[in-house]
Image (cartoon, rainbow, N blue to C red):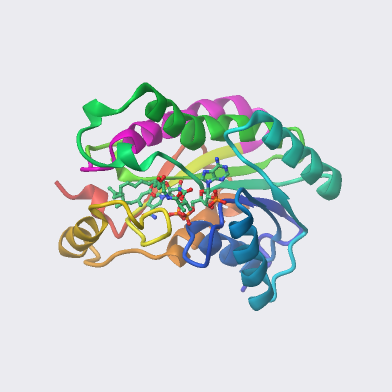
């Protein structure tokens, strides 16, 4: 579609299947000429990703295992990525995790363990990844993560993940300040509800998604491709003046009172 990302090596973290936001992002980056590197955690995700890449005729530069709750795993993945790619220009962090028990009922019942797990996997992981990725981002570049409006407002059932996303958005700002001097921009997308594997099995998704159709200025939900294109913009030089920002890709839902 364009050569905006020609010669740019971008790491995409968090494709579990064809519904993943990470996959919508990967397709958009590919369409604009990027060379892609993927990380996965579960073998099942690797199987799905391998199949998707083949079906779509995308040849990745490499695929590496990476569990973001483990510092050694992140260091090993980025050591391999650096060795293979030499230099990277971007990282897409599209992952989060909280225990199912914490994603229902009252937030006040969140256990210490559940709180730490959500923060560790969903917010601190961006900090740890940025630190490793920075070593290879010697020409500058961009880091983009994925958030949700539950960071700003109370959304029923989102609970501990809302607090983790609030931390994630604050991490974006602090990282933007640190990495700005290396010409590395750090931003987030705040997407509207999209039916993915993560959204499955947690209650409340359908209601939230139909309220968006009723109330959002565009009177519809967004999809993975729209988040993909906005992320592509934040990775590309088109957004060269933007850092520390959270852009809503939510059909305008967040402006409504
Ligand atoms: P998916 O279920 O498709 O993707 C979630 C990904 O997180 C999986 O690839 C999973 O990998 C990965 N993951 C979880 N824990 C770890 C870990 N410790 N180490 C490495 N990978 C891990 O869901 P989405 O595409 O919906 O989620 C992507 C991002 O988008 C998340 O940050 C989510 O909060 C955010 N988001 C989603 C919205 C939605 O409505 N779907 C709305 C707004 C934001 P594996 O399965 O291999 O462990
Ligand atoms: C208010 C909404 C309804 C749903 C409530 C909470 C959703 C939280 C998202 C969080 C990432 C989900 C999980 O961690 C699920 C996990 O406990 C079980 N699932 C898995 O292990 C699967 C197999 C893997 C692939 O998932 C992960 N995450 O690894 C929020 C809705 C309207 C919007 C959403 C879904 C936002 C979001 O952040 O994802």
| Residue 137 can be seen in this image | no
| Residue 167 can be seen in this image | yes
**238 or 164: which is nearer to us?**
164
Whether residue 117 appears in magenta in the rendering, the answer is no
Which residue does the image show at 68% across and 36% down from the upper left?
74
**78 or 88: which is nearer to us?**
78
Which residue does the image show at 61% across and 74% down from the upper left?
1
Residue 210 in the image: state x and y as whole percent: 20, 63
Q: Which residues are magenta?
A: 155-184
Residue 70 in the image: state x and y as whole percent: 62, 32
Which residue does the image show at 50% across and 46% down from the upper left?
95
Q: Residue furthest top?
A: 112
Is residue 187 placed above or below 210 in the rendered structure? above
Badge count: 0
- Left or right: 49, with 256 as reference point: right
- Left or right: 136, with 30 as reference point: right
Which residue does the image show at 50% across and 62% down from the upper left?
229
**176 or 49: which is nearer to us?**
49
Residue 26 in the image: state x and y as whole percent: 59, 61
Question: Which quarter of the picture shows residue 216?
Answer: bottom left
| Magenta residues, dominant SS class | helix
- Left or right: 30, with 239 as reference point: right
Is residue 235 placed above or below 183 in the rendered structure? below
């Amino acid at each position: 579609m364009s050569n905006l990302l020609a010669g740019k090596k971008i790491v995409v973290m968090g494709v579990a299947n064809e519904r993943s936001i990470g996959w919508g992002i990967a397709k958009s980056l590919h369409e604009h000429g990027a060379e892609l590197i993927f990380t996965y955690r579960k073998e099942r995700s690797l199987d799905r990703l391998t199949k998707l890449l083949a079906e779509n005729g995308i040849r990745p530069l490499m695929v590496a295992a990476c569990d973001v709750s483990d510092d050694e795993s992140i260091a090993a993945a980025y050591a391999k990525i650096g060795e293979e790619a030499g230099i990277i220009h971007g990282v897409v962090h599209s992952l989060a995790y909280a225990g199912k028990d914490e994603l229902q009922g009252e937030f006040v019942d969140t256990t210490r363990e559940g709180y730490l797990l959500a923060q560790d996997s969903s917010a601190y992981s961006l900090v740890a990844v940025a630190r490793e990725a920075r070593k290879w981002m010697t020409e500058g570049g961009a880091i983009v993560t994925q958030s949700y409006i539950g960071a700003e407002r109370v959304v029923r059932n989102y609970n501990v993940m809302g607090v983790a996303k609030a931390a994630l958005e604050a991490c974006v700002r602090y990282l933007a300040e640190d990495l700005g001097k290396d010409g590395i921009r750090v931003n987030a997308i705040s997407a509207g509800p999209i039916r993915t594997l993560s959204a499955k099995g947690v209650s409340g998704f359908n209601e939230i998604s139909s309220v968006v159709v009723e109330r959002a200025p565009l009177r519809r939900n967004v999809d993975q491709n729209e988040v993909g294109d906005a992320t592509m913009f934040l990775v590309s030089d088109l957004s060269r003046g933007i850092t520390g920002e959270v852009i809503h890709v939510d059909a305008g839902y967040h402006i409504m009172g």
